[in-house]
Image: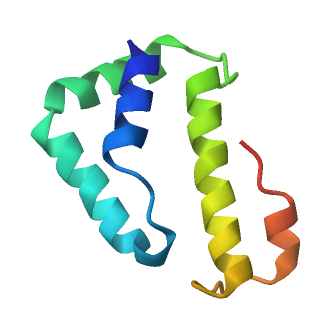
């Protein structure tokens, strides 16, 4: 079920690197519109305990977001107050 939630979220609320605040608002709005989904995700995070291995769907979604934001940074669409060093260590 978590995989389905992840895929649906990525499909229906795609990241928009040129409008990260708007993306955050859309995620928040979706979470408040579907509290059952938010509760399930919170339950899942609690139930996994010390297992910090990300699910493949979550890892892929995160990688896609990092790639899009990195591309926008490289293109100059968005800027970062960080120097280049922290970007090298971005991991999923």
Which one is in front, 22 or 50? 22
User: Where, by quadrant of the figure, is residue 59 drawn?
Assistant: top right
Above or below, 73 relative to 24 = below
Which one is in front, 68 or 55? 68
Above or below, 34 relative to 19 = above
Which one is in front, 65 or 54? 65
Q: Residue furthest left?
A: 33
Is residue 74 shown left or right of residue 38? right
Above or below, 16 relative to 7 = below
- Point out residue 46 in the picture as x, y percentages from the top left corner: 45, 19
Residue drawn at 41 percent across, 52 percent down: 14
Residue drawn at 21 percent across, 45 percent down: 30
Residue drawn at 15 percent across, 33 percent down: 34
Above or below, 67 relative to 57 = below
User: Where, by quadrant of the figure, is residue 24 drawn?
Assistant: bottom left
Which one is in front, 76 or 59? 76
- Point out residue 33 in the picture as x, y percentages from the top left corner: 11, 41
Residue drawn at 40 percent across, 75 percent down: 19
- Point out residue 13 in the picture as x, y percentages from the top left corner: 33, 49
Question: Is the N terminus in the top left, top right, bottom left or bottom right quadrant?
Answer: top left
Is residue 43 shown left or right of residue 81? left
User: Where, by quadrant of the figure, is residue 62 drawn?
Assistant: top right
């Amino acid at each position: 079920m978590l995989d389905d939630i992840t895929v649906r979220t990525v499909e229906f609320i795609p990241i928009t690197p040129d409008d990260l605040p708007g993306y955050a608002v859309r995620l928040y709005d979706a979470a408040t519109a579907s509290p059952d989904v938010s509760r399930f995700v919170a339950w899942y995070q609690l139930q996994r305990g010390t297992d910090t291995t990300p699910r493949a769907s979550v890892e892929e979604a995160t990688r896609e977001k990092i790639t899009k934001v990195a591309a926008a940074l490289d293109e100059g669409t968005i800027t970062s107050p960080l120097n280049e060093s922290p970007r090298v260590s971005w991991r999923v």
